[in-house]
Image (tube, rainbow, N blue to C red):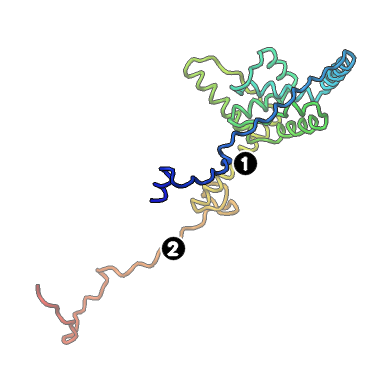
Amino acid sequence: MLSLALRFFGFTSAPAPRSPSRRRVAPTVAPAPAPVAPVVLDAEARARRNAALKARADAAERDPNFRFVQDVATVVRTYDPHSSQPSAEQLQLALVRLGDVGTYVRAVYLGGARMSVLAESLRSDRARTKAYREHVESLSRTDLDRWEAGAIAADRAANEARRYGNPQPAPLSIPEDIRVKLDARAVEKARRLAEQAARRNGGGGTTGGSAGPTGSAPAAPPALPPAGPRRSEESTEETPEGNEPPAGPRR
């Protein structure tokens, strides 16, 4: 305290000043980067690039697999509220070109499912468009779950429109071979349910429990246990004297 007072009144010398802190030093401004000079193509180079892009687009347009991917994407866009909607003419043209595959895409979205679409950056690759087409066509022939869900949803929508007087939606024309598979699947499902009901009811066959395992006559009911003697047939002889059971206390 005394040294501080002496230093304040100038009797002692002040300490040497501290070196400036790094935090107090103003940061140096980095030099601004040089502007990027745009690449200027001469007329000949620009013409070559445009010709190459046009030839690539023409080749993709002539590829049937590329057109298939484009048509699938057009049908999918009609069910995507966040995408630009195609016109009615574009949608009808895509459905006509796709055929049963277009009906399958509709069934997928009517049933509440979704379908993957090949990205636009990959549609120029012929190997990818070919693999995508084979995959979708295989699904349209074997994916019975989505066919069935779409058919149920289409029937429900038609019934609701008929009930409330709304315009009928476009029908879902299921191909004949797919309909045959769905009918056979429904028959098989009903048969399994009948067998389960028969097993729950005690039978082992498919006749609802009225026959045995091989379809023969129903088995005989189990024998009842022998009944005890009736009261009238019981012995009426009195118990000999001295053998009576002890009498209990009176209440």
| Marker disc for residue 109 | none
- Above or below — where is 71 with respect to 196? above
| Mark 2 and mark 1 residues within 8 Å of each other at the beta carbon | no
- Tell me the quarter of the picture where residue 251 sits: bottom left
Disc number lying in front (2 or 1): 1
Which residue occupies 90% across, 14% down?
44
Foreground of the two, 54 or 198:
54
Which residue corresponds to mark 2?
Answer: 223
- Residue at x 18% of width, y 83% of height: 244
| Direction from residue 106 to residue 36 in the image, left or right | right
Please tell me which residue lies in front, 200 or 33: 33
Residue at numbered disc 1: 188
Q: Position of residue 201 (x, y in %)?
A: 49, 51
For residue 91, which quarter of the picture?
A: top right
Percent of width and height locating residue 19: 57, 43
Instruction: Give the alpha-carbon distance from disc 2 to disc 1, as whole Å.
Output: 37 Å
Identify which residue, 213 or 116, lies in the foreground. 116
Give whichever of 47, 115 is nearer the camera: 47
